[in-house]
Amino acid sequence: MRRPAKIAPPKGKLGVLTVGLGAVSTTFMAGVDLVRTGAAQPIGSLTQLGTIRLGRRTEKRSPLIKKFVPLEKLENIVFGAWDLFPDSAYEAAAKAAVLSPQDLTKAQNFLSGIHPMKAAFNRDYVKRLDGPHVKKAKTKYDLALEIKEDIARFKKENKLSRLVIIWCGSTEIFLTLDKVHSSAAKFEEAMKQNHPAIAPSMLYAWAAITSGVPFANGAPNLTVDTPALQELARKHRVPICGKDFKTGQTLLKTILAPGFKARMLGVEGWFSTNILGNRDGEVLDDPESFKTKEESKLGVLEYILQPKLYPNLYGNICHKVRINYYPPRGDNKEGWDNIDIFGWLNYPMQIKVDFLCRDSILAAPIVLDLVLFLDLAQRAGMRGIQEWLSFYFKSPMCAPELYPEHDLFIQSMKLKNTLRWMMGEDLITHLGNEYYD
Ligand SMILES: NC(=O)c1ccc[n+]([C@@H]2O[C@H](COP(=O)([O-])OP(=O)(O)OC[C@H]3O[C@@H](n4cnc5c(N)ncnc54)[C@H](O)[C@@H]3O)[C@@H](O)[C@H]2O)c1
């Protein structure tokens, strides 16, 4: 990929369409509104609070990322969504019960004005959900065309210059790559034939990409991670990324595991269990949706610890992940980790982590950053998989010949070096031996 000769400035307004108007989307939308009205701080958002060091340490240049790269301002963002329930964003946020009544009241006017468009939904792909606000059409192809019309209408009605679409919908059942995902032509034919390998999330991704709109996937579904949609993304010059927001337990895993490996400490077992009681938890209670999530969560350690390179340390790990739907907890998930490690002379040790987290509070700033960075990438002429955004995902998408990078610190370095590269600044290697000449 060539360095962008120039990055188009963010002129006009940016539209954000979320697929799904549930806990994560409404917490994201309410949060952006509270931040732009000065009622809250954008905590957790790299684009809003992060700085980036430029040049040598002695130069003392560390601007805010949002001052360094031309990101869209929060004031210029317009929100919309699709969902199979007709509730406004206010009603959906009240049901999700993530935000306090005080915060909900502050965002009430704004959220009450956001009404979802009808969803392309099929219960075969999310067994625990059913809702009345759905599109009806003969084929999946017709549904995808209706989504394209929604996108065009939303853009026109709100006088937007650009759009980003992000999947914040429920986790679909586990699907593997099929022949019909191998090329754009086969994919289109399969939509017309109502082929079972085409899930609703893929219809949104296809509609976004063929409308020239960047697309991010916040759930572990296959969605845009297929050769067909990647071919279309390159053709339509659209940046894409996914899968599955890296928020709670997996975030901690990708912080801790690189540390163990850096110090050559062995790991014998890692048992992770979660209780959560939101709608996401209810959907994940279905074994087929859980399988999709499990695959996404299990891959992380394998890639970070590299058991083939370090068979004595990581060759025999017992790694288990459990998710239990437990309604009393609502969105406030509890994730426990028991980690059995061993050190010098094989002496065993244990680490226990109990993360009492808030799922959507951790996910919302990720949605914001992804939206702003994807819009930036598109204005910079970058297309296809944006591997530099792996930082935000549990199962980062990457080129077919590569393995995904999971180590949070490598991901963070890659993200910041990509920003430096886009802006023609020197990359930072942390070598620093020139100070000792
Ligand atoms: N920390 C996190 O919260 C986190 C982390 C990683 C991934 N995720 C994923 O993000 C997604 C959203 O999480 P959430 O907590 O907001 O869930 P949620 O259940 O509150 O919201 C999902 C919404 O998507 C809607 N939906 C489902 N299928 C749809 C379709 N085909 N079209 C339109 N709308 C559809 C549902 O009706 C629901 O309102 C889930 O897949 C979850 O696994 C969340």
Image: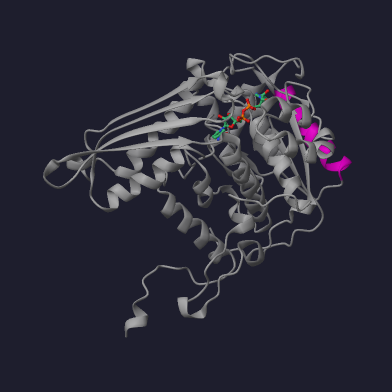
Task: Estimate the x, y position of residue 162 in percent, counting from the top left.
Answer: 76, 49
In the rendering, at what x and y percent does residue 345 appear? 11, 45
- The quadrant of the rendering that contains the C terminus is bottom left
User: Is residue 366 located in the magenta-colored stretch of the structure?
Assistant: no
Which picture quadrant has residue 209? Answer: top right
**Snapshot colouring:** one colour
Residue 211 visible within the image? no
Q: Nearer the viewer, residue 226 or 283?
A: 283
Residue 295 location (% of width, % of height): 42, 28
Q: Is residue 189 visible?
A: yes
Reply yes or no: does residue 157 show up in magenta. Answer: yes
When the figure is inspected, residue 141 is found, relative to residue 98, above or below; the finding is above
Q: Compared with residue 201, is residue 400 higher up or lower down, i.e. above or below?
A: below
Horizontal side, residue 26 vs residue 57: left or right: right
Foreground pick, 124 / 251: 251
Give left or right: position of 180 versus 368. left
Residue span colored magenta: 141-158
Residue 119, placed above or below residue 50: above
Q: Quadrant of ligand 1?
A: top right
Secondary structure mainly formed by the magenta segment:
helix
**Residue projecting furthest to the left:** 345
**Coordinates of residue 201 in the picture (x, y in percent):** 63, 28
Q: Is residue 15 left or right of residue 244?
A: right
Report the side of 205 relative to 172 (left or right).
Answer: right
Nearest the viewer among 433 and 91 is: 91
Q: Residue at x 76, y 53 (%)?
A: 38
Q: How many marks?
A: 0
Picture quadrant where residue 424 is located: bottom right
Q: Which residue is depicted at the point 49% across and 17% down?
A: 288
Q: In the orientation shown, which residue stands out farthest toward the bottom?
A: 437
